[in-house]
Amino acid sequence: MKAAFIYEPFKLEIKENVRIPKPDKDEVLVKVRAIGICPSDVRYYTGEGIHKEVPYGEDSYGLLGHEWSGEVIEVGSEVENVEIGDYVAPDSLVPCNNCRYCRMGLTNLCKNKKFYLRGFAEYAIAYGPNAYKFPKNIKFEEACFAEPLSCVVNSIRIADIKPEDVILIVGAGPMGLLHTQLAKLSGATVIVSEVIKDRVNMAKQVGADIAVNTVEDDLSREVKELTEGIGADKVIITIGNRVAIEQHIKFVRRKGTVILFGGTAPPTNISIDPNLIHYGEIILTGASDHIGEDYRIAMRLIIERKILLDPLISHTFKLDNLAEAFETVRSKKGLKVVVYP
């Protein structure tokens, strides 16, 4: 098969005649039809985010690719939920189901979790029980959103959005736009803060009540007008940017919640006046990965076409041009970038 390899930051190669992996008894082999690029993929490419399960070098085939969908080619002897020919979008996160976090239902925080990655290849291995089927009227590109959408489902659940809430979503990249749509499905009024003009327009297209270009307009005025001057009920910061985090925390109301959804790379420190949290009784929390139920909900949202996905795909590339695809995401030229192996 053809597969991507990386030997050091920015040194990416696409090799042919790579051995096709063999599934174990609880695994399936999938012909990858489409794969989305996640910011974690780009950080791996640039050297800002090394992953212990996929070291650089000859064992790096397929990289960290995890937003993929495809067709089942081979099924392990113990797999019963899918058959050859099924279209699937595998959940890459496999918890141990034994540690204390797992016993608490927090499988996204599992101490021993494993990941089925390596999707930047013509074939990839998935954990059989995590191979979620979807009907053939759903495009492979749409199914690629299952993993990122499941992380947004987790974030929205943590936010505990009520229909009367005013939500401020910071960032109108793919994750911010998915947050916008799910917050609207929850009945909230949604304000989106963004600095890139095209993304501001896209936020409006997918349902934001107000989308503010913070370079040109006054976000504070818009938030105050919608909230009787007290601030947003929930602030979800979808970008891992220190300045954005520090600036937008102040827009939450007293007793409100701020969610840090986007990881920062490289790691950084933020400066917060603790009195803001103390006297305002503000909840500051994170949202990371997803649990199995989040993934099932994401698949249902995609299959039932509750979420606009096609407008979010701005670029497509062949696997041979993967480095160019990574650079496109890195430069923020578009939104979601999808690769076809």
Image (cartoon, rainbow, N blue to C red):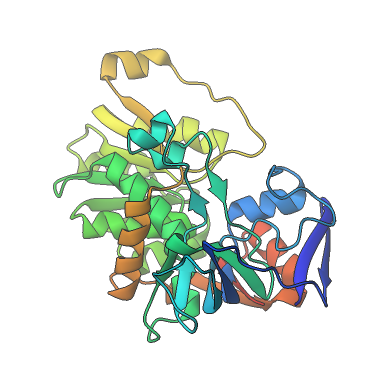
Residue 103: give x, y in percent of width and height.
35, 34
Front residue of 284/62: it is 62
Residue placed furthest toward the left? 164
- Residue 86 position, x and y percent, is 45, 80
- Residue closest to the eye, 174 or 108: 108
Q: Residue 191's x, y, as percent? A: 32, 51
Frontmost residue, 53 versus 278: 53
Q: Is residue 156 visible?
A: yes
Q: Residue at x 50, y 76 (%)?
A: 141
- Name the side, left or right, on which 268 lies relative to 149: right
Quarter placement of the C terminus: bottom right
Residue at 30% from the left image edge and 32% from the top image edge: 257
Does residue 116 sit above or below 321 in this rendering?
above
Q: Is residue 211 visible from the viewing direction of this image?
A: no
Total numbered labels? 0
Residue 244 at what x, y percent from top left?
A: 50, 38
Q: Quadrant of the N terminus?
A: bottom right
Q: From the viewer's perspective, tell me whether residue 335 is left or right of residue 226.
A: right
* Image point (57%, 74%), residue name: 30
Q: Describe residue 173's horizontal placement relative to residue 333 as left or right.
A: left
Asked if 155 appears above or below 116 in the picture, the reply is: above
Q: Is residue 163 above or below residue 78?
A: above
Q: Residue at x 50, y 65 (%)?
A: 198
Foreground residue, 90 or 248?
Answer: 90
